[in-house]
Amino acid sequence: MKKVVALLLMATLLGCSHKKKIPDVSDIKVDLKTIRFEKDFFAIDTNNMANGLQTLYNKQGGFALDFFYNILGIPQSPDSVIHDSKLFIASYKNIYNASVQPFANFQPIEDQVKKGLQYVHYYFPKYPLPNKLVTFVGPLNSYAGIITPNNTLAIGLQLYMGRNFSVYQSDEILNMYPPYISRRFEPEYIQVNCMRNIVDDLFTIYQPAKKSTQLIEQMVDEGKRLYVLNAFLPNVPDSLKTGYTQQQLDNSYASEKTIWTYFVEGDLLYQTDPTIVGPYVNDGPKTSELGEGSPGNVGQFVGGQIIKKWMEKNDKITLQQLIQTPAKQIFEEAKYRP
């Protein structure tokens, strides 16, 4: 019986593994410079904060202001910046120290991000690529990664220290980031989250302003984002791009028809009530209604399968056109029936 199940699962995975030809982007030039902001910030002499912060600002410019005012949330006054920065250095020095060795050589991660940006430029040649990759150590309840207005991708290393980092095991942090979230606090997610930020930015630029409310539209929108992310990271494992465990991803493929039947027979596709829709399009350890082996945000998987079906029928469609096509239209034309 186990052999039969294994063969069926293999057939299912092979049947769902259709991918478009990966373009050659090796000749696309990307200028990306890594700046280690956290090293300069935590090197400040706290007995001479004013001069240290001025030196930091002279060297780091615009990102220093983003860090103080947006990431740390310090009021915009010199005294507040001095006082609150000093407190933050004292509170987070141990986390900074723990980050030094794992991220001593950031070149491999820079190369990964640069490769993703080559694909971004291939598909969206007019999109202004970030030219700086800034690392920082910020509050644990803050950003894992952001795009700042000054063409910068900023990476909060405090949320990439490895799932077993001792700080993540404290009750306070477990309440903030339960294990299904903190298991993704691995360096391998940096590239994925950088590209995810760019995907979000592209959807802000190109997607119509009307926000989808029906479950099926939200699932298709999730699928669009996943499809674009796949295009930027064609060689990255799908488990990293979806945020699912590999087992959850395998279960989703194996149970694809069952999942779809659940939505159709439960009359869920056109629901708009957030309390009904939310469990299927929000992050979580699982989708309770579909059992222990299911992922949270299972709607992303369903939407991704719908998009793949639609793109197979419309293989001349660009990614920009995909983003701009209404979700309802895609669903109706895909005629998805697993």
Image: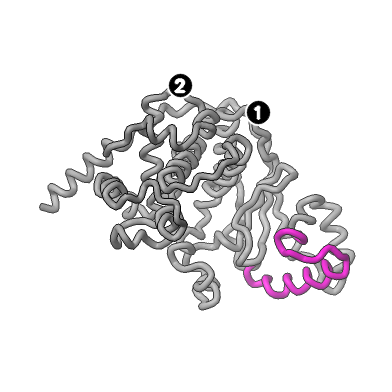
* Residue 155 locus on image (x, y percent): 63, 53
Rendered view: 309 above or below 196? above
Question: What residue sits 70% from the left and 60% below the top?
Answer: 71
Q: Does the rendering let one see residue 114?
A: no
Question: What residue sits 41% from the left and 58% below the top?
Answer: 276
Residue identifier under label 1: 126
Residue identifier under label 2: 316
Query: For the residues marked 1 and 2, what is the alpha-carbon distance in whole angstroms?
Result: 19 Å
The span picked out in magenta is: 68-95
Q: Does the rendering let one see residue 263?
A: yes
Classify mark 2: helix, strand or loop: loop
* Residue 82 locus on image (x, y percent): 84, 69
Mark 2 residue type: Lys
What is the total number of numbered labels drawn onto the structure image?
A: 2
Q: How many C-alpha atoms fall within 10 Å of the one at disc 2: few (<14), some, or many (≥20)?
A: few
In the picture as drawn, the residue positioned furthest to the bottom comes out as 171
Classify mark 1: helix, strand or loop: loop
Rendered view: 215 above or below 209? below
Question: What residue sits 31% from the left and 60% below the top?
Answer: 289
Q: Is residue 135 magenta?
A: no
